Image: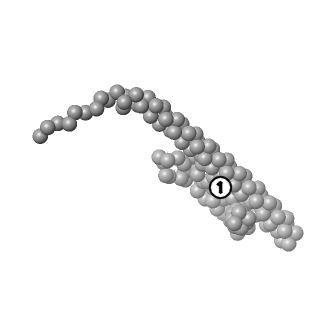
Amino acid sequence: MSQVPRKSSKKRDRFQPISQALLQALLAIDSEAVNTAEQKSIEDYAQIQRRLLFATLIVSLAVFTITAFVFSLFVARSLLVGAIAGVLYLRLLARSVANLNGYSRRVNRSQLLVPVVLVVAASRFSQLEFLPAFLGFLLYKPALLIQAILDA
């Protein structure tokens, strides 16, 4: 078999710097787009988090006011303590989710101490009723539903 003589690689060498520069430019544009998209998603998450906390505070204050008029200030105070615990729980959960990255898929479990401390406090102290405190803790759930309905 006879070998076909190859053409000189001068032509290929001449275009190599151009192709490398083009590749670097494309990679720079792509990483810039990724950084912009990542920054936008972080801003969107922060906005959703603020709206959810605000909605939770509004629902909690409305239910506290209604409870104070319908029942007693004692029951309303227990509900308010539970609502504050719910806001703290929601804030800790949001911080834990914000700290997730591509490597760690585990959510921090420190926020689980909030309902445990609330239940222990309600059972130990006579100034705090268990049921209103627990229902106050769960007031972040209606705020979540309201946010989901408003976003849809």
User: Looking at numbered disc 1 in the image, what kind of residue is underneath it?
Assistant: Tyr
Front in this rendered view, residue 136 or 104: 104
Q: Residue at x 67, y 51 (%)?
A: 44
Asked whether residue 31 appears in the rendered view, the answer is: no
Identify the residue at horizontal 63%, vertical 49% (top origin): 41
Residue at horizontal 74%, vertical 55%? 51
Q: Is residue 4 left or right of residue 69?
A: left
Residue 58 x/y as whole percent: 80, 60
Task: Residue 103: give x, y in percent of width and height.
Answer: 47, 46
x, y percent for residue 24: 49, 34
* Quarter containing the C terminus: bottom right
10 Å neighbourhood of mark 1: few (<14), some, or many (≥20)?
Answer: many
Q: Which residue is labeled 1 in the image?
A: 89
Colour scheme of this structure image? Answer: one colour
Q: Pick the residue in front: 112 or 148.
A: 148
Q: Is residue 22 visible?
A: yes
